[in-house]
Amino acid sequence: MKITHCKLKKSIQRRLLEFFVAEVTARTAADLLGIQANTAALFYHKIRQVIDYHLSLEADAIFEGKIELDESYFGGHRKGKRGRGA
């Protein structure tokens, strides 16, 4: 999967990708590049969709085969009272 239709210039797309990797917020990236904040947020969302698609492909390849579970128990009841009257 790749981003197929985008009206942004390639240079702005490249800069947005650099900002995404550097963990800059979409709003800050938009201010630095002089574009609308919604445009940057939409592009960030498209980047996340591409990442999700590729990670799901890798997960399908990694998690093949049988799964074995142990007999661990998580949870239960706490001892004693809790709350204001405790």
Image (cartoon, helix red, strand yellow):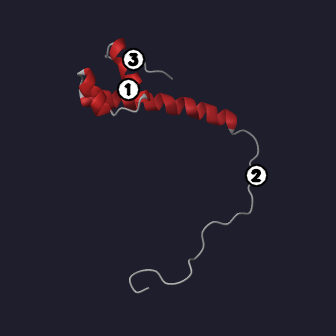
User: How far from the left and from the top, in percent, is residue 45?
Assistant: 39, 32
Instruction: Specify few, some or many for label 2: CA neighbours under 10 Å numbering under 14, 14-19, or 20 or more.
Output: few
For the image, the number of numbered tags is: 3
Are there few (<14), some (14-19), or many (20+) residues within 10 Å of tag 3? few
Secondary structure state at the residue bearing disc 3? helix
Q: CA distance from mark 3 to mark 1?
A: 9 Å
Q: Residue at x 76, y 52 (%)?
A: 68
Three-letter amino acid code at the position of disc 1: Phe
In primary-sequence order, the first of circles 3 and 2 is: 3
Residue at the location (60% across, 31% down)?
A: 57
Residue on which disc 2 sits: 68
Q: Secondary structure at mark 1?
A: helix
Do tag 3 and tag 1 residues touch (Cβ < 8 Å)? no
Left or right: 50, with 58 as reference point? left
Residue at point 38%, 30% (across, down)? 44
> Of tags 3 and 2, which is closer to the observer?
3
Give yes or no for contact between labels 3 and 2 (Cβ–Cβ under 8 Å).
no
Place of residue 27 in the rendered image (x, y in percent of width and height, measured from the top left): 28, 33
Which mark is on residue 14?
3
Identify the mark at residue 19; answer none if there is no mark: 1
Q: Tag on residue 70? A: none
